[in-house]
């Protein structure tokens, strides 16, 4: 008997092994794709100054927030748009014509939020806000139709305005023109002339290094738009204190005219 007989190497079913590997890979890719198409929607219930009941429903897309606020006594949903910044929530309450009627500034408290709501119709009177989460669901990210239109906001009593013209003629590109004015007494301006920028899904990024590093992200929701600076790149050549960042509502869906 040969005690040192060389063993034959094991033969693996390479075809089956590779097939299983690719099936697992495909499943992971599909799962990742589905996850990327899902957003978190949360509903909060609470009150202003403990006596004006409200329901706030928000869908989070990255740091952007899109939804509605309902004052229970009136029962009419009002558009709410904003963002999460350093863990805090900032929202604009917008009418269909772009008028800003209220501002939320909130910080987390347990599974809810606390902070203030500024009533702009009453010269900025602040109300204490307390909210608790009552529902959380996962919703499929909607494929938005053509984004063409005019998006705007306007504060009362010369508090500042903003307008962004958007033209989409193909899936992966939009043309923008930004015109925002800071409130008095300076009325400094933030302007971006007619510019083509790439669009990926519902997000577009504008970059310009003419005055330093400038980087703005445009996140579109259904008839709304949130604009935020990225990477602390604020040097856009705007007037002192003027900014294109903020929350906008689509006031017109018609094709804008660029100067």
Image: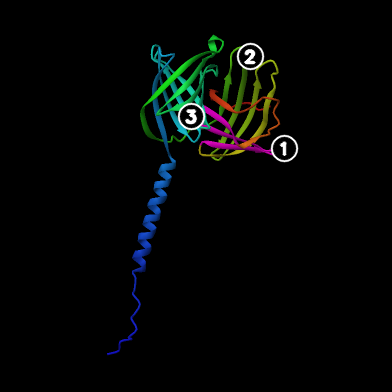
Q: Residue furthest top?
A: 122
* Residue placed under numbered mark 3 in the picture: 65
Give the quadrant of residue 245.
Answer: top right
Q: Residue furthest right?
A: 211
Q: Residues within 10 Å of mark 2 (few under 14, many from 20)?
A: few
Q: What secondary structure do most residues of the magenta stretch adopt? A: strand
* Residue placed under numbered mark 2 in the picture: 158
Give yes or no for contact between labels 2 and 1 (Cβ–Cβ under 8 Å).
no
Q: Earlier in the sequence, mark 3 or mark 2?
A: 3
Q: Secondary structure at mark 3?
A: strand
Compared with 99, 27 (above or below) is below
Give the quadrant of residue 243.
Answer: top right
How much space separates mark 3 and mark 1, taking CA atoms? 30 Å
Q: Residues within 10 Å of mark 1 (few under 14, many from 20)?
A: few
How many marks on residues? 3
Compared with 204, 49 (above or below) is above
Q: Residues within 10 Å of mark 3 (few under 14, many from 20)?
A: many
Q: Residue at x 48, y 26 (%)?
A: 107
Residue 228: say if magenta.
Answer: yes
Q: Is residue 199 visible?
A: yes
Q: Secondary structure at mark 2?
A: loop
Q: Position of residue 227 (x, y in %)?
A: 57, 30
Residue 83: say if magenta.
Answer: no
Q: Is residue 51 left or right of residue 196?
A: left
Q: Is residue 188 left or right of residue 110?
A: right
* Residue placed under numbered mark 1 in the picture: 210
Q: Secondary structure at mark 1?
A: loop
Q: Residue at x 46, y 32 (%)?
A: 60
Give the magenta-colored segment's residue range.
202-230
How much space separates mark 2 and mark 1, taking CA atoms? 30 Å
- Residue 57 is labelled as none
The quadrant of the image that shows the C terminus is top right
């Amino acid at each position: 008997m040969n005690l040192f007989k060389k063993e034959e190497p094991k033969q693996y079913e390479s075809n089956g092994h590779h097939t299983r590997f690719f099936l697992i890979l495909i499943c992971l890719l599909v799962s990742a794709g589905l996850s990327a198409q899902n957003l978190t929607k949360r509903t909060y219930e609470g009150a202003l100054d403990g006596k004006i009941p409200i329901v706030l429903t928000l869908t989070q897309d990255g740091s952007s927030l899109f939804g509605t606020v309902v004052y229970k006594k009136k029962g009419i949903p009002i558009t709410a748009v904003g963002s999460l910044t350093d863990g805090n929530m900032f929202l604009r309450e917008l009418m269909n014509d772009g008028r800003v009627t209220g501002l939320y500034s909130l910080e987390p408290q347990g599974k809810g939020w606390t902070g203030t709501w500024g009533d702009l119709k009453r010269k900025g009177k602040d109300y204490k806000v307390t909210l608790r989460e009552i529902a959380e669901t996962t919703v499929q990210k909607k494929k938005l139709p053509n984004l063409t239109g005019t998006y705007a906001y306007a504060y009362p009593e010369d508090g500042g305005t903003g307008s962004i013209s958007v033209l989409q003629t193909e899936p992966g590109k939009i043309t923008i023109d930004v015109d925002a004015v800071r409130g008095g007494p300076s009325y400094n301006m933030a302007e971006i002339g007619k510019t083509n920028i790439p669009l990926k899904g519902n997000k577009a990024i504008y970059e310009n290094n003419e005055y330093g590093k400038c980087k703005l992200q445009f996140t579109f929701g259904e008839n709304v738009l949130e604009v935020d600076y990225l990477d602390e790149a604020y040097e856009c050549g705007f007037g002192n204190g003027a900014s294109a960042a903020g929350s906008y509502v689509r006031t017109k869906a018609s094709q804008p005219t660029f100067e």
